Image: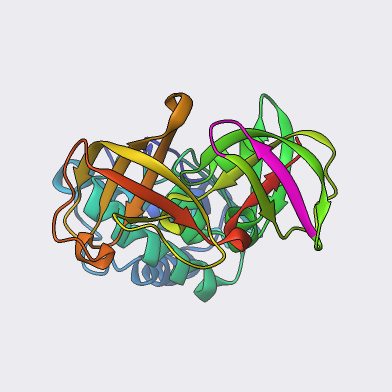
C-alpha cells in the first residue's frame, strides 16, 4: 500500500525504508540489496540510497513510498490518494510516471482518488461510488462520453444539466421538452418516457453572435462571466428562466470573435448527437 501522507519512516535512510518489508519477512541480505536497487531504479531514485526523508522533496518521498511497496512484488498495489500532497505540475508529471510504472511492473493498481483528471488519465477502468453504492464501472472514455446517470455525468468532468420531459419519438429521434430551451430532437438509443435529464459537456458547445445554420440545437443567451486560463476560457452564459450554461472554448478566436464581453447577447448551440439523455 502507498499512503496519502507517504508514511516514509523519518529515522531511516531511503535504502532502509525500501528494504524494511523484505527485512522483516526474513529475505536474505544479498537478495534484499539486489531488489532494493531494482526498486529504486524503477522509480528513478538511483543514488539516493543514503539520503534521509527530510532531505527529499514531496515527489521524491512519494517515489520512496512506491519503491517500498513495489519491492515486495505484490499482486495488487493499493494507492490511497497518492498524488494529493503534490503541487499541480509535479502531480501531472507523476500521472505519466505512475501510468508507465504500472505498465512496466504489470501488476494491478487500485487507486482511490477524488481527482477526476487523475482517474481519467491513470485508469483503464473507473468505478464511481456515491454514498457507498457503486453507480457505474466503465473505461474513462465511456464514463465521460456515456455516463449512465445524472450523478455520474456531473461527477466526472463538467456538465450542463437540464431538466426535461420525453414526449415522444419523431423521425427516429427522441423529442424532449427542456425547461428554458423548448423542444429538442435528440438521436439516442436510450428508451425514455416522462421526466428525464439532458447533459451537454461544456466543450461541445459553441457561441456565435450570428444565428447558427443547419441541424443544431440553439437558443439565445447573454454572457454573464468569463474566466481566462491561457490556452482556454470558460464562459458563463444565461438563457431564459435564469438557465445557466458553461461553455468551454479552447481559444476565443475559434468563435470568430476576437473578444467576447460581459452582457454580450449571443447564440449558444451544439450538435444534437452530443446530447446525453439521462433517465436516472
**Snapshot quadrant of residue 172:** bottom right
| Residue lying at 55% horizontally and 58% vertically, measured from the top left | 72
Camera sees residue 209: yes
Residue 126 is situated, as x and y percent measured from the top left of the image, at 63, 52
The answer to whether any part of residue 147 appears in the image is: no
Query: Which of these two is toward me, 121 or 83?
Result: 121
| Residue 15 screen position, x and y as percent | 32, 56
Q: How many marks?
A: 0
Which quadrant of the structure image shows residue 98? bottom left
Image x and y of residue 69, in percent: 49, 53
Question: On the picture, is 146 further left or further right than 267?
Answer: right
Colour scheme employed for the rendering of this structure: rainbow
For residue 176: magenta? yes
| Residue placed most toward the observer, 209 or 31 | 209
**Residue at 57% in and 65% down:** 215
Q: Position of residue 247 (x, y in %)?
A: 37, 48
| 88 with respect to 83 (left or right) | left
Looking at the image, residue 169 sits to the left or right of residue 197; the answer is right
- Taking depth in this image into account, of 267 and 206 the one nearest to the observer is 267
Q: Which residues are magenta?
A: 173-181
Predominant SS along the magenta part: strand
- Relative to 58, residue 7 above or below: above
**Residue at the location (37% across, 50% down)?**
267
| Residue shown at the point (72%, 38%) measured from the top left | 135
Residue 272 inside the magenta-drawn segment: no
Q: Quadrant of the C terminus?
A: top right
Residue 224 lies, with reference to residue 267, above or below; the image says above
Amino acid at each position: 500500500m502507498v499512503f496519502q501522507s507517504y508514511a516514509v519512516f523519518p529515522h531511516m535512510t531511503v535504502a532502509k525504508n525500501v528494504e524494511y518489508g523484505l527485512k522483516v519477512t526474513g529475505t536474505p541480505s544479498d537478495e534484499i540489496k539486489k531488489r532494493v536497487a531494482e526498486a529504486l531504479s524503477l522509480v528513478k531514485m538511483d543514488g539516493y540510497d543514503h539520503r534521509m526523508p527530510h532531505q527529499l522533496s514531496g515527489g521524491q518521498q512519494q517515489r520512496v513510498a512506491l519503491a517500498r511497496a513495489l519491492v515486495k512484488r505484490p499482486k495488487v498495489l493499493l494507492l490511497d490518494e497518492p498524488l494529493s500532497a503534490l503541487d499541480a505540475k509535479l502531480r501531472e508529471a507523476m500521472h505519466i510516471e505512475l501510468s508507465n510504472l504500472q505498465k512496466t511492473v504489470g501488476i494491478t493498481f487500485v487507486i482511490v482518488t477524488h481527482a477526476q483528471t487523475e482517474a481519467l488519465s491513470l485508469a483503464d477502468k473507473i468505478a464511481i461510488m456515491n454514498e457507498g453504492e457503486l453507480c457505474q464501472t466503465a473505461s474513462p472514455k465511456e464514463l465521460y462520453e456515456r455516463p449512465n446517470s445524472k450523478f455520474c455525468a456531473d461527477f466526472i468532468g463538467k456538465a450542463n444539466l437540464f431538466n426535461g420531459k420525453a414526449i415522444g419519438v419523431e423521425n427516429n429521434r427522441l423529442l424532449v421538452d427542456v425547461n428554458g430551451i423548448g423542444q429538442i430532437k435528440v438521436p439516442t438509443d436510450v428508451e425514455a418516457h416522462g421526466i428525464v435529464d439532458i447533459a451537454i459537456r461544456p466543450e461541445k458547445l459553441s457561441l456565435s453572435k450570428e444565428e447558427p445554420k443547419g441541424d443544431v440545437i440553439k437558443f439565445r443567451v447573454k454572457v454573464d462571466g468569463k474566466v481566462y486560463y491561457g490556452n482556454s476560457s470558460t464562459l458563463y452564459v444565461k438563457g431564459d428562466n435564469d438557465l445557466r450554461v458553461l461553455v468551454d472554448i479552447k481559444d476565443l478566436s475559434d468563435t470568430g470573435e476576437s473578444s467576447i464581453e460581459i452582457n454580450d447577447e449571443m447564440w449558444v448551440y451544439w450538435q444534437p448527437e452530443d446530447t446525453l439523455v439521462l433517465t436516472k
